Image (cartoon, coloured by chain):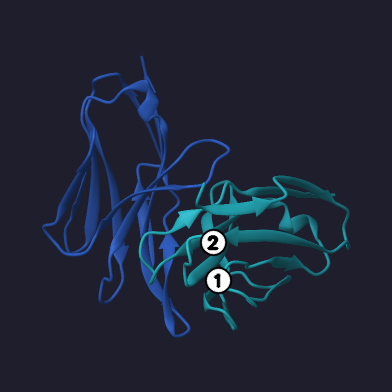
Amino acid sequence: EDQVTQSPEALRLQEGESSSLNCSYTVSGLRGLFWYRQDPGKGPEFLFTLYSAGEEKEKERLKATLTKKESFLHITAPKPEDSATYLCAVPTRAGGSYIPTFGRGTSLIVHP
Amino acid sequence: NAGVTQTPKFQVLKTGQSMTLQCAQDMNHEYMSWYRQDPGMGLRLIHYSVGAGITDQGEVPNGYNVSRSTTEDFPLRLLSAAPSQTSVYFCASSSRGLGYTFGSGTRLTVV
């Protein structure tokens, strides 16, 4: 069965303290991996799509990387405004289509 | 502003009542999906559609119906509300199944 697992469930950082979030997946024939950011009371906001092992994408203080079994979201010198829940998702077979299956997310809090 | 619009934002229902959650997108996306989000459970797929007239069930479809008569709209119907359906519901749309755009959600409480 396809599965997406994120770790840690929660992460507290001091401002400027870099760290990484992990998303491991068990799907056959990866068709992309998505990262989203979700603020409290809002819908998820799309960040990145990664398609192949070795691929990297960056946006401000965030860098996403992909291997054959997992993806990392690296946060460099985070600021309090980076506090949010970060979700990853992979397209999994649903009927005749591929629809994103989401992990449970990592709740990140960055203290000033 | 282009995007996914969900209404209402908040709703309280009594057990057994029915209602429709509305979702509309103006990006001409083929794919649309409904998810529910519960504490500790993440986003779970209820129903999805890959085009007008085409719908299918996701992971947790029981108690919900959908239809897709136009590209723009994808309403979710609760047939007979139950307390277990208390959740936050998100509608999302995508072009060709790539990065999805989400609405702001409907927070539903069933008492």
Q: In the picture, one chain is blue; tell me its letter.
A: A
Colour applied to chain B: cyan
Chain letter, disc 1 residue: B
Place of residue B54 in the rendered image (x, y in percent of width and height, measured from the top left): 56, 83
Question: Quadrant of residue A52 in the image?
Answer: bottom left
**Disc 1 designates what residue?**
B59
Crowdedness of circle 1 by 10 Å Cα count: few (<14), some, many (20+)?
few
Place of residue B68 in the rendered image (x, y in percent of width and height, measured from the top left): 63, 76
Q: Kindly report the distance in space between the C-alpha atoms of the residues bearing marks 2 and 1.
A: 7 Å
Asked if A18 appears above or below A67 in the picture, the reply is above
The reply to whether callout 2 and callout 1 are in contact (CB within 8 Å) is yes
Hey, what amino acid is under mark 2?
Arg
Q: Which residue is drawn at the image coordinates 42% and 55% (left, top)?
A: A103
- Furthest residue toward top: A112
Hey, what amino acid is under mark 1?
Glu
On residue B44, the disc is 2
